[in-house]
Amino acid sequence: MDPTPRHYDHLLLGTGQATGTLIAGLPDDASIAVVEGAAVGGTCVNTGCTPTKTLVASARVAHLARRAAEYGVETGEVRVDFAAAMARMNEVRHGSRDGLTSYLAEKPNVTLLRGWGRFVGPRTVEVGDRRLTAERVILNVGARAVKPPIDGLDDVPWLDNVRVLELERLPAHLVVIGAGYVALELGQVFRRFGARVTVIEAAERALPREDEDVAAAVRAILEGEGVRFEVGSRAARVAPAGDGVAVRLENGTRIEGSHLLVATGRRPNTDGLGLELAGVATDERGHVVVDEVGCTSADGVFALGDVNGLGAFTHTSVHDALVLLDHLSGRGPAGADGDHGPPRTIAERDTVYALYTDPPLGRVGLTEAQAIEQGYPVLRGVKQMGAISRANEMGETQGFVKVLVDADTDHFLGAAVLGVHGDEVVGLFALAMSAGLSTAQFRRVVLPHPTIGELMPFVLDGLEPVG
């Protein structure tokens, strides 16, 4: 053990997306240590957004090629070169990881230390035989896939979101346990690549956190492509079956597949950090408890990203970092006139995310069920994608738009955009909600034709009370 601790202004554990944002915003003369025991870039770059959305893109090309005749285009037989698709994915994700690694190496005030960090006292961390202290320690250690308590799981070579990206051959039949975002995105990808896919969900429907109409529409789209669903019964046992795996459900149904993907949730990487030695409190799920600026129960220790349980998305991790930078500087982002607004907080942001099935689902704010449960007088407007001229021109008419409005205030409560460009279009509603626009103000906007977004103000023409 190095007997002389090295002291830094900022000590960052983990290299997820919040880390790059923080380093770019901290003073150039601040001494910064970055500790990483795995691949630089965290989940998003290595096993999340970057590789999976690269695969989504390849799968979409295959899907469109099979539909080419609908557009008057002749292609002949469409075949997917799985190895080439995976190679493209690796090229993209490795490029992103190498770019971030180079960025850290080129910053003269940043020291990148490879190894696992662990608290041994307040604002004191050991990395191998090195002991580090800092004015501020920032936890950005992410989360990992949950291993569910399924009998026999240890007896089969099951896949999680990491190992599925290392496959060298296309599964003949991919069985997926779970029907959340990871499960459905990858399920559709592998189906479009040519695998049979069966999705198992213990709840009564897929996407149990979404409104029933939204979840049903997503399921119908995937079933239309040949994805099979088994819902309402938990996987009770798994066992080897020839060269593959068999899953027995609690209702007695038996499903055999060549590969098993388990996608039943994630847990924060807080175990093994020695948080108790630093005075850092966690909740019952292991997330680090933070206030509205990311500060933990320990003075000078902050937690950003998945580990704090307040977002679990790359964009919320980046926002956490921006919130912390505002907190440290005492001011918010500047306008064109150079004047700074108040510092941002975690509490002020609206929930916004996307499910990257194809077509994607963009979501912001409350679901309809949440709005009703919280007692809002809800007005609902719905428009089918087939009523939007651009969607028809593109041949992408699946899905719908749903907007929720507070009848008392005329402000948006939430929106769901399931359809082509839904992940982008939902940003219109996110911006309106952040700016506090009323629906009357939103209706005044003029958007270009033909676009998907141009019809969003007209969804409000059909507002009706819920219930």
Image (cartoon, rainbow, N blue to C red):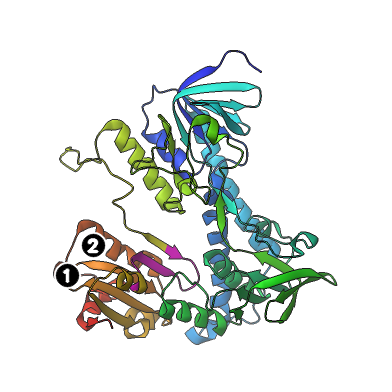
Where is residue 29 drawn, in percent x and y?
39, 21
**Could you tell me if residue 347 is visible in this image?**
yes
In the displayed structure, 326 sits above or below 92; it is above
Residue at x-position 46% and y-position 74%: 359
In the displayed structure, 319 sits above or below 9; it is below
The residue that mark 1 highlights is: 410
Numbered mark located on residue 432 in the image: 2
Disc 1 marks a residue whose amino acid type is: Asp
Q: CA distance from mark 2 to mark 1?
A: 12 Å
- Find the residue positioned furthest to the right: 242
Where is residue 102 drawn, in percent x and y?
54, 35
The answer to whether 83 appears left or right of 417 in the picture is: right
Which residue range is magenta in the image?
354-368
Quadrant where the N terminus is found in the figure: top right
| Element at label 2 | helix
In the displayed structure, 170 sits above or below 125; it is below
Q: Which is nearer the N-term, disc 2 or disc 1?
A: 1
Q: Is residue 464 magenta?
A: no
Picture quadrant of residue 183: bottom right
Disc 2 marks a residue whose amino acid type is: Ala
**Could you tell me if residue 108 is visible in this image?**
no
Q: Is residue 357 magenta?
A: yes
Numbered mark located on residue 285 in the image: none
Numbered disc in front, either 2 or 1: 1
Quadrant where the C terminus is found in the figure: bottom left
